[in-house]
Image: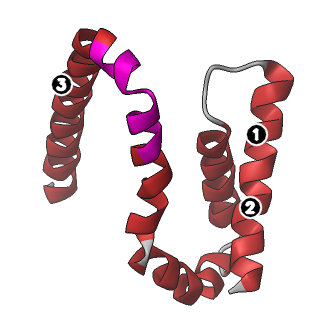
Amino acid sequence: MLRTFSILLIFQSFGEGIVHLFDWPVPGPVIGMLMLFLYLLARKGMAEKLLPDVQVLLRHLSLLFIPAGVGIMVHGQRVLNEWLPLLLALLVSTALSIVVTALCAKYMQK
């Protein structure tokens, strides 16, 4: 478990470093996840080694949403002030996700 957690934190740290180095408007953990994905594609057996520990982390995934919920509560006034752009972003991203999922499912059925 410690090894898996260390790998996740290392890639998150790399992502944060890259974002700060290049001043990108993307969260560091997103870049870290992309790097981890590429690493797992390159190292074929590594995903299987991480799987048991990752499944344990996924069982407790809901705990990882607590900081986001607290952040929304802390910035409640800002959410109220900017509700329209937030609503539009949610609707557009949801619609795009549905379309992309449908296209992928259609492609996979062929």
Identify the disc placed on residue 16.
1
x then y, percent, for residue 16: 76, 39
Instruction: Identify residue for label 3.
Output: 91
**Is residue 95 highlighted in magenta?**
no
Dot 2 amino acid type? Leu
Screen quadrant of the C terminus: bottom left
Q: Secondary structure at mark 3?
A: helix
Identity, as a three-letter code, of the amino acid under mark 1: Glu
- The answer to whether 108 is drawn above or below residue 68 in the figure is below
Residue 17, horizontal then vertical, whole percent: 83, 37
Ranked by sequence position, the earlier of labels 2 and 1 is: 2
- For marks 3 and 1 on the same chain, the one whose residue lies earlier in the sequence: 1
- Which amino acid is tagged 3? Leu
- CB under 8 Å between discs 3 and 2: no
Image coordinates of residue 73 in percent, x first then y, are: 39, 37
Q: Position of residue 56 (x, y in %)?
A: 49, 85
Residue located 60% across and 56% down the image: 37
Q: Quadrant of residue 19?
A: top right
Q: Nearer the viewer, residue 45 or 26?
A: 26
Instruction: Name the secondary structure under disc 1.
Output: helix
Q: Residue at x 59, y 42 (%)?
A: 30
- Do we see residue 82 in this rendering? no
Instruction: Give the magenta part as a residue range.
Output: 70-80
* Residues at marks 3 and 1, CA–CA distance in whole angstroms: 28 Å
> Closer to the camera, 26 or 85?
85
